[in-house]
Image (spheres, helix red, strand yellow):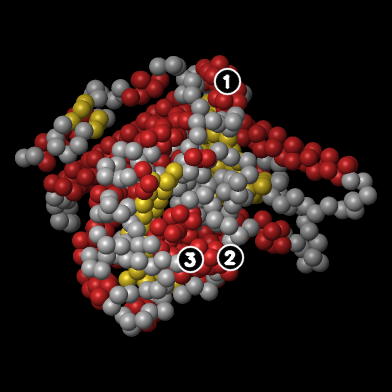
Amino acid sequence: MPLRQNKRQPIDIDFTLRRVFGKKAFRPLQREAIEAAIEGHDVFLQAATSFGKSLCFQLPAVVGHGVTIVVSPLLALMVDQVAALEANGIPVATINSTTPLAQRREILKDLLSGHPNTRLLYVTPEFCQTDSFRENLQTIHLQGELTRIAIDEAHCVSEWGHDFRPAYKELSWFRKELRRPFVPITALTATATARVRSDIISLLGLDPTTLKKFATGSARPNIHYEVRYLGDCSMDPAFPDTDQLHDLLCWLGSIHGRRVARLTTQNNENPDEPAATPPLPPMTGIIYVPLRAICSELANSLSAAPLNIKAVAYHAGLSASERSKIQALWSSPNKFLTATKDKSGNQSQPPAFYIVVATNAFGMGIDNPHVRFVIHWTPPRSFEGFVQESGRAGRDGRAAVSLVYYSPQERDRVFDRMSRDQEWQIDGAMQGKKRKAPSHEDLAAKVRNQEALLESFRKVVKYCESTTRCRHEIIREFFGERDMFVEQRNVQPTQVHVDDATTTSMCDFACDFCKEGGEAVTRRKELSGAPESSLEDFVQSGDNEVVKFHDGLGDFTGFRAASLIDVFRDIHR
């Protein structure tokens, strides 16, 4: 396909970066990805959380003409990005379920004017399915004002991804219908395996002859990855939750003690400095828990502990205003310090830690680069989700910690919950009550996605139970970073760009295995009561053996084989 040329000199890009976005320099691969987009290439970008992927379609939209359509899966993420762009003086708009009718009409009037002022329009994938939006988009395209399509969280297009959204598959309409002139597509994701990458490229119709691919490593070199096996610091086997809380408080206490000692040493080394030193801002962290009830219970327990911890619960059950307030104060320690001053302007003693205890409702759009730790209270339900959530620590480039609490008992509970969810979703789809009966393709897609989720959790188990390998290396292996993009056909080496600094195999003691050694990690695991065969037992668990299916829909291994066989029998009747 012919490229839509829109070349600019590098000085334009650097000037826009500083003047409009307030950033001093590009991160590795950002410049290359932005230049490829401006030159009119299809672009695929896989980069870790905190890379700054949104800049790779926002900056081209500013320096070029016309409109960039941005497809985003979450309303909260969309609103945050729109607000940030508006703060930088960039003409941006969004049309979603909360947009008033009058405002929607004004936005469309501008977009259809033939010379729109709007540079970026944020929409949901479901809105892209509507006939009215497609008709308006075709009009903008015929006017020559549709510059590019940016698809954020592109892994949602794949049934083998952890966040599959059926509406994402319909985004293939862009490439099928908007052909002349050619409209380039930028697809972005933080978490995609080799299979998901292939799906993104094929399902979105990215042109292999002009496609430019960019990738950074998924494991973050500044994050120390650690697994804590419940039982390491056991006080009473009858109360494992108490043991876990005790272990967490001991860990937080040691961190705070080192922080205070470092400040005391600095004051002693500078005796001529004023004695009154500004209070240390609270250290921010996230603890992910599986249930809302645990959010409130754990937040209350941490706040009651004698460590001066401020802990707040965050989940979908809170109102939008409550969630926004929590995120705003937590994201800015300086704002929080101001909020803790009394009426006379005196600073009260700030907490040592400001911790958000959250379900996975807390995540997308977090604007806090100074998160020092992310803790998973139980094993995460997907490996991609784990990497994305732990990657919210240390976005300022400084040292941070990812900690997972693990036990065979909790592993089995998570697996049972996932198995029940799988059976419930498949049964619901099969019954088709109060809605149109699912098609063969829809039902098969649901089965594939459920199996992908189970496979992803198996990788979580493998990560947690491993005592013989670097955890950074396990993460890289999961995402296929040793052979990043080699599996893609018809792509020349000059079209592939990988940041080698983030894909090296050296951990530099940034995980418990490399720091403590395999023997020490194995001893900790044995203390927890997890037998060496637990992973194999887990893989073979259930009433039925593991079965391979060869049904033309793809090969996959199924837990609960009998129930899945019933599904396939119904599909093929």
Name the residue: 58% across, 69% down: 19
Amino acid type indicated by mark 1: Gly
Whole-percent x, y for residue 533 in the image: 40, 17
- Residue 9 circle label: 3
Residue under pointer 1: 517
Furthest residue in direction right, as rendered: 272
Q: Which mark is residue 18?
A: 2
As measured in the structure, the alpha-carbon distance from the residue carrying label 2 to the one carrying label 3 is 15 Å
Q: Measured from the top left, where is residue 393 in percent x and y? A: 56, 45
Q: Is residue 385 left or right of residue 157?
A: right
First-in-chain label (2 vs 1)? 2
User: Which mark is in front, 2 or 3?
Assistant: 3
Figure check: 477 above or below 69: above
**CB under 8 Å between discs 2 and 1:** no
- Which residue: 67% across, 61% down? 335
* In-front residue for pair 212/130: 212
| Label 3, label 1: how far apart the Cα atoms are | 51 Å
Whether residue 388 is visible to the viewer of this picture, yes or no, is: no
User: Looking at the image, is mark 3 or mark 1 earlier in the sequence?
Assistant: 3
Tell me the crowding category of disc 3: few under 14, some 14 to 19, or many 20 or more residues within 10 angstroms, Cα based: few
**Vertical comparison of 89 with 109: above or below:** above
Q: Could you say which quadrant of the image residue 57 lies in? A: bottom left
**Is mark 3 in CB contact (under 8 Å) with mark 1?**
no
What residue appears at the point 48 percent right and 51 percent down from the top-left corner?
29
Q: Identify which residue, 516 or 26, lies in the foreground.
A: 26
Regarding residue 264, the answer to whether it shows in the image is yes
Measured along the vertical axis of the image, is residue 180 above or below residue 249? below
Relative to 525, say whether 295 is above or below.
below
Q: Residue 97, percent across and down?
A: 35, 69
- Image quadrant where residue 419 sits: top left
